[in-house]
Image (cartoon, helix red, strand yellow):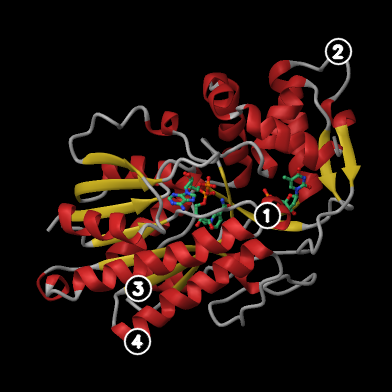
Amino acid sequence: MSMRMLVTGGAGFIGSNFIRLALAEGDIGRLVNLDKLTYAGNLKSLADIEEDDRYCFIQGDIADGDLVEKLFAEHGIDTVVHFAAESHVDRSIVGPGEFVRTNVVGTFTLLDAARKAWADGTASTRRCRFLHVSTDEVYGSLGETGYFTEQTPYDPRSPYSASKAGSDHLASAWFHTYGLPVLITNCSNNYGPFQFPEKLIPLIINNARSGKDLPVYGDGKNVRDWLYVDDHCRAILRVLAAGEPGQTYNIGGNSEKQNIEVVTTICDLLDKKLGLLDGRPRRELIRFVKDRAGHDRRYAIDAGKIRRELGWQPRVRFEEGIEMTIDWYLNHQDWLDAVLDGSYQDYYRQMYHGR
Ligand code: NAD
Ligand code: TYD
């Protein structure tokens, strides 16, 4: 039977990529996108699919219990893919309250609405799934060696990762206590089209394109494991189709890079594509700035479980993915202009220039 799916946060980066892929390749009868449209959500990211008869958009808050319960009932939801979150670590340091409200209270609200909706017998007649999308940051920070596995103890360090860890524990509790068919995925850093340009890769592309400073925190040697967003979305479809409720799946790109390597790669590719900037290489725009408070040193994922059990592995190598991403941003200035409104510019000035 086709899925009747509630996607939360579908106007954000990963959610919009997921909706596009799910409608193209998934067995979808109905897809309801519930998104509050915060600064990070933009319907321009979904302009090409909004006419699809199976799709509908609802602007609202995941922490609004009445609304969420109504959506379950009205649309006969049997599948939830929960992306909605406050997602930027730097913002969580400046204003953690919204992270607790959306990521913890919002996740609780959704879990409980699913429990109530599916307790009426739905789950005995239809295949129900609640997929909670989370991050590898819940595991804390690695040293030079080692990988996060599904058994790694939780050790979140930032308000963002602590709020995601809290939401993971709630999701797990709703499986153990109420038998809700919950699946949890913990994924490494994503990059690709439609990512809000406050995250490292789109920020550097956007600034380097136009000759602005490129802020690199600390010594630039922090390591992240980069995954092309389409690969993440394919993993989520795979977990929905074949994952076992109650299980956690780590998802990673097997592509560890120091931040400074990522930044110099983008500079060099832009020099090649656009020519030097006033005769100078873009690497000269790099500025080492004050480190992020509590900056996790290294993340790296062992994605062996999802490969062995569900047959998923990433398709896109970083070298290809970064070039596709740069090309996408160069060709979508209209999207960038639409998402970069005044409030973001104020935030950016305050964060990086102290004015
Ligand atoms: P994003 O910030 O681009 O998008 C978040 C979306 O959620 C936005 O559309 C926003 O409007 C919406 N939203 C925020 N608060 C809401 C609320 N209270 N009610 C309804 N909608 C709300 O985030 P993203 O990068 O697409 O991340 C999506 C999910 O994936 C998050 O749960 C994040 O923790 C997780 N994740 C992200 C990454 C990454 O590298 N970006 C990696 C691993 C996991
Ligand atoms: P980010 O994209 O914010 O993802 P996360 O903090 O969730 O991993 O940052 C990726 C890495 O890049 C992280 O180590 C912080 C660093 N960084 C910079 O050096 N400069 C920047 O301007 C930003 C936004 C991030």
Does residue 9 sit above or below 212 in this rendering? below
Residue 182 disc label: 3
Instruction: Name the element at disc 2.
Output: loop
Residue at the location (80% across, 22% down)?
Answer: 211
**Quick one: which residue is furthest to the bottom in this view?**
177
Sequence order check, earlier mark of 4 and 1: 1
Choose the circle earlier in sequence order: 1 or 3: 1
User: Please, what is the three-letter code of the amino acid marked with disc 1?
Assistant: Gly
Q: State the CA–CA distance, disc 2 to disc 4.
A: 63 Å
Q: Which residue is mark 1?
A: 95
- Which amino acid, mark 2? Asp
Q: Which amino acid type is marked by label 3?
A: Val
Image quadrant occupied by the N terminus: bottom left
Left or right relative to 353: residue 154: left
Residue topped by disc 4:
177
Q: Disc 1 versus disc 3: distance between alpha carbons?
A: 29 Å
**Disc nearest the viewer among 2 and 3:** 3
Local crowd size for mark 2, using a 10 Å CA cut-off: few (<14), some (14–19), many (≥20): few
Instruction: Please state if 99 lies on the left or on the right of 66 as rendered.
Output: right
Camera-side residue of 301 and 36: 36
Q: Place residue 10 in its image quadrant.
A: top left
Q: Which mark is residue 278?
A: 2
Do the CB atoms of the residues marked 2 and 3 lie less than 8 Å apart?
no
Q: Residue at x 49, y 77 (%)?
A: 169
Which tag is nearer the camera, tag 2 or tag 1?
1
Position of residue 155 measured from the top left corner of the image (x, y, whole percent): 67, 77
CB within 8 Å, label 2 to label 4: no
Q: Residue at x 43, y 49 (%)?
A: 9
Q: Earlier in the sequence, mark 2 or mark 4?
A: 4
Q: Earlier in the sequence, mark 3 or mark 4?
A: 4
- Would residue 220 be visible to someone looking at this image? yes
| Type of the residue with mark 4 | Thr
